[in-house]
Amino acid sequence: MILARPLCLLGLGVLAACSRAPSSQDSLSIGVNNRASNAFICLVEKGSKGKSKRWKSVLLDRTERGLHELADKKVDVAISAPPTFFKYAIQHPQQAQEFRIIAGINNIQNTFAVVASKRSGIRAVKDIRSRKLGHLGDIVDFFKTYFFLTEGVNETSIQQTTFANYESLMKALESGSVDAAIVSDEISRRLDTNRFTIFYSSVHEITSQVIVRRELIERKAEILSDFLEELISTEKELYLDLNESLTKLKTCFPESHEDLLKELLQRRELRVLIDESLRAQYNLYKKWIMARNEYRPFMVVIRKFNVTDYIDASLLRNVDYRRVLLK
């Protein structure tokens, strides 16, 4: 894949990408391993007005490689997806203890609504406990986990039924076969509010994390804060001029098709923050992975895993307290 060409061949981060020399006190080497992360870091480098010499991207060939490089002190920062970090943490718990998530970047918006029939007597989200809830299964799993976690409702207390499509789900809601349903925002807005109580919620899914060794949070606090500030600045400027952002991306990835680069910019919200959605995501990963036989040897570690133990929002809070929305 063109975007996966080594950055040393593209003229970015020659020393970091090719020699892998440990970075000095006033610089950062950043391990990235997917297209969206690479694009985001590229925008940071191209828009940082001279500061880019202080941080350079190291393109890695496998999704988990950045975390191994981080543990070996070959990079200072790893940009890693939450599922990748979760699997690494349960397979290498001793090394992962030294890691801290200092920010989340690259977000996908999820907009659904929980709709309850008024004849069901459900007036608040907490009333859904012990009631019948219908939904479409995997497509709403993340939203469902996030929604009930933040509302303080234990999912196991709800009787859940999966439906094949919205038509059968709405028929069940109309007939009273289920008391409530999770539906798309579009469908919920067509419903008669005299007959249904609607609980709207729009959440985002963090698709990448900024991860560092915890000892660097104090030792390299200034440059890490500068890096987070640059991420936030890039985010704010990204949609002010899409063409300008596209031009910057093309200088990083000159052989890539323009439509592919546009898709990278348009399909995600490139936001920077840490909030409750991260906890919800990891709870969902735990549920998925505990059901898979190949992870049975790690079950004790999986059950003990708590993503809060790996979060340090102090730098992000100092940069912009509004970006930290953890309770």
Image: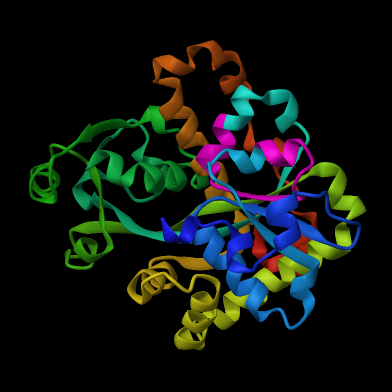
Q: Which residues are magenta?
A: 68-87
Give the residue drawn at x 68%, y 55%.
17
The percent position of residue 53, horizontal first and vertical second, equals 78, 71
Looking at the image, how many numbered discs can be counted on the residues? Answer: 0
- Near-viewer residue (159 or 136): 136
The percent position of residue 236, horizontal first and vertical second, equals 59, 79
Give the residue drawn at x 79%, y 59%.
28
The percent position of residue 18, horizontal first and vertical second, equals 69, 53
- Is any part of residue 327 visible from this angle? no
Return the residue found at the far front. Answer: 9
In this rendering, position of residue 313 left or right of residue 223:
left
In this rendering, position of residue 196 left or right of residue 144:
left
- Near-viewer residue (56 or 274): 56
Residue 304 among those drawn in magenta: no
The percent position of residue 296, horizontal first and vertical second, equals 48, 13
Give the residue drawn at x 59%, y 48%.
60
User: What is the image's colouring?
Assistant: rainbow
In this rendering, position of residue 318 left or right of residue 181:
right
Residue 74 among those drawn in magenta: yes
278, above or below 317, in the image: above
In this rendering, position of residue 165 left or right of residue 30:
left
- Is any part of residue 249 visible from this angle? yes
52, above or below 9, in the image: below
In which quarter of the view is residue 191 placed?
bottom left
Return the residue found at the far top. Answer: 297
- Near-viewer residue (285 or 167): 285
Q: Indicate the quadrant containing the N terminus: top left, top right, bottom left or bottom right.
A: bottom left
